[in-house]
Amino acid sequence: TPTTYSFTVTATGDGSGCEEDSFSGTIVVLPDDRLTLTSGIGTDDQSLCVGTDPLISSLTTITYQISGGALSANIIGLPPGFSTSYNATNKTYSIFGNATSDVVSNPTIFNYTVTTSGTCAAVTEVGAITIRPKAKVTVTSASPTLDQIVCENGAITPITFDISGSATNASGSGLPPGIGLSGLAGSTITISGNATVDVSTPTIYTFTVTATGNGTLILGTADGVISSIDQ
């Protein structure tokens, strides 16, 4: 806190009894700014997924308290849509928000800074908020390839998909025996193969391709139909 030092300068004589003279003054020493993370350890470095589920998209509130000579603080570099507030009673700044919109196409780190302002030297704290977009899957082959009719043991026209966002791979369900997903080649995954089935009547297989990612993510899906008919 500001500290006042009161001083006195006194002229001294040679002991002959002459009157002494003195002068008094004060020196006020102001503290440098101080800035302290008061939310939990690690809250200044968070990773969020885009979505409406608060468990994965809501930021754990980050709080900083100013003290010493700090009179205010400035916060810059937050992701779009995130906000700050100031509590004058306890001199605390809060950062909060939700990753509810795709502001990035790939996982992106937003480095933010909190800088104090006051009479003396300012201090800065740095944090990071990582936004991970939804895992997405997009059909890249001609749209009719999603819905096909093949004969028993017949080969389908390959169906290709592109994964993006936070997706690192994809999985398929509901496909006829003999037809499956290839391994990921770059960002492309392919459904191909022969319908090794023995059916007595036309049989419809409704399948779903789901883009998967690291951790808990909002997943993208694409649906189609493969009908197998008796030869």
Image: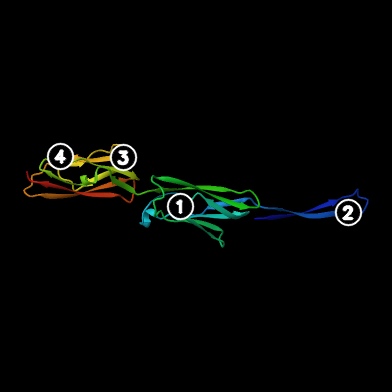
Q: Which residue is mark 4?
A: 155
Q: Residue 95: where, in percent of width, then height?
A: 49, 55
Q: CA distance from mark 1 to mark 3?
A: 27 Å
Which numbered disc flags the more N-terminal residue, 4 or 2?
2
What residue occupies the far bottom of the structure in this picture? 89
Q: Which residue is mark 3?
A: 187
Amino acid type at image mark 4: Ala
**Quadrant of image for the N terminus:** bottom right
Residue at 87% from the left image edge and 54% from the top image edge: 21
Q: Residue 108: where, in percent of width, then height?
A: 42, 45
Q: Which residue is mark 1?
A: 80
Which numbered disc flags the more N-terminal residue, 4 or 1?
1
Q: Nearer the viewer, mark 4 or mark 3?
A: 4
Circle number at residue 124: none
Which numbered disc flags the more N-terminal residue, 2 or 1?
2
Q: Nearer the viewer, mark 2 or mark 3?
A: 3
Q: Which residue is mark 2?
A: 20
Amino acid type at image mark 3: Ser
